[in-house]
Image: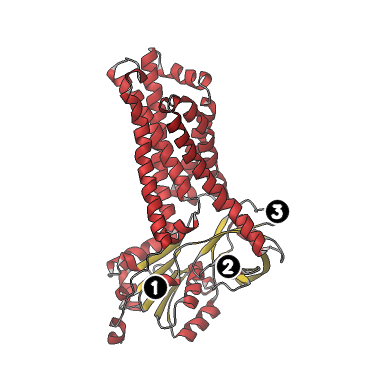
Amino acid sequence: TMSAQTAVTRRKPRRTGRYLAANFMLAVIGAEGGFAIAFGLMPLLEPTSISSGSAITDAAIALSRVTAMAGTYLALVTLLLAARIPWLEREIGQDRLISWHRKLAPYSLYLIGAHVILVIYGYSGLADSNVWNQYWQFVLRTPWMLPALAGLVLMVVVGVTSYKRARQRMTYETWWLIHMYSYIGIAIAFMHQIDSGVMFLNNDKMKNAWIVFYASVFGAILVFRWIIPFVRSRRHDLRVEKVVRETRNTISVVVRGRDVSELNAKGGQFFGWRFLDGKHWWESHPYSLSASPRNDRLRVTIKDLGDASEGVARLKPGTRVMIEGPYGTFTADKAYSDYAVLIAGGVGITPIRALLEEIPRNVRVDVIWRASTENDLPLRREIEALAEWRGATIHWMVGSRHQFPLTPKKIIEAVPHIDLAEVFLCGPDGMVNEARKSLLRVGVHPDHLHDEAFAY
């Protein structure tokens, strides 16, 4: 009824120590960016650092140093944002961190490319030689220049394949492997910067500070993406218990372990999964939990697409599992209202199903489930049983996109007072973007909209 729908109360989000730590880290990252640019500008204060060429030549050389420092700094920050630092992920959200990562990465490449062009142009003018000859002088005679060039090429490859259209034309496995080249590219360019950068040649404090920054970023990646996951996975003795076929193109994997509750995972979160079957052990795949974690079990439900997911369908019981996480803020404790609407598209129902189990029973819940066909409704019986158990209403939208578009009109027809709700939205990238625009148009406040897209 209208009176029941409008009697909605909200709690204020609780600020935790992790929240303060996350904001402090972001402030430090911003301050270090200022220092990086200042490092590039410092040689300008030394008259002997730039030869007396033309004003344009000197300006090009000076600007090349600033772009080198700023570009390298942004490259390191993009790696840090993807380092899976747990308290940063939990408070800010992996989706937001990866969004920042994607937005910053192109600018890093642009700045490093500008550095290359400017330094070649500046020194060619200084030596009164053509640009092509100066380029080969740098490559063949400057220490560590060849590794730096190789690093730039790798970063360009990663940058080109990271554009949305390029990503859509390759499997996750191919994209993931190519993306690993960015780590190699940045690492092998390190010695060129330390050995040749004018700002470091006679300034050991500055050089040591830059080395510490490099070491901190790569150390975070090593610790949080490899060492801790390996140790925790061995400690909890995680192994595949069984693989269950849910629909013609969806499978669930149940993983058994020891004292799994100590992982502090929540429904709606995801792990990076490595199934150590000897084939795809080196690839980490992000799969959301499709049920509330138990003390001895975790479950994920996966759409059977690509080489890796096909391999998962053939996993044998007893196969060891290595996990990174848990990650994500798409959790029941973000329901600050006593009314929640859960919107799922296709296999996006998996974290929604876990939320349906974990959101307190005193919270009124509506579920909108969008799918193309009846065969695209994995875990249907579980969803219906949970909805009946807690008195939730399921609004089915099974059919073509033309029949059930997630427009403002369709959403309001299903849930008239959605603007009063805490909304959780999960599904394919395109569906989430479409639904998000519609939800904002019908009055859902951005702070009350929690979304997660299945895309890489």
State which quadrant residue 10 falls in: bottom left
The quarter holding residue 297 reads bottom right
> Mark 3 or mark 1: which comes first in sequence?
3
Circle 2 residue: 262
Do we see residue 98 in this rendering?
yes
Disc 1 from disc 2: Cα separation: 23 Å
Mark 1 surroundings within 10 Å by alpha-carbon count, few (fewer than 14), some (14 through 19), many (20 or more):
many
Q: Position of residue 386 (x, y in %)?
A: 50, 81
Q: Which mark, residue 335? A: 1
**In the rendered structure, which disc, 1 or 2, sits on the residue that comes first in sequence?**
2
Residue 55 in the image: x percent, y percent? 28, 19
Callout 2: 10 Å neighbours few (<14), some, many (20+)? Answer: few
Picture residue at 70% right of the left edge, 57% below the top: 277
Q: Is residue 389 above or below residue 23?
A: below
Task: Indicate whether 274 appears above or below 185.
Answer: below
Residue in the image at 53% along x and 26% along y:
144
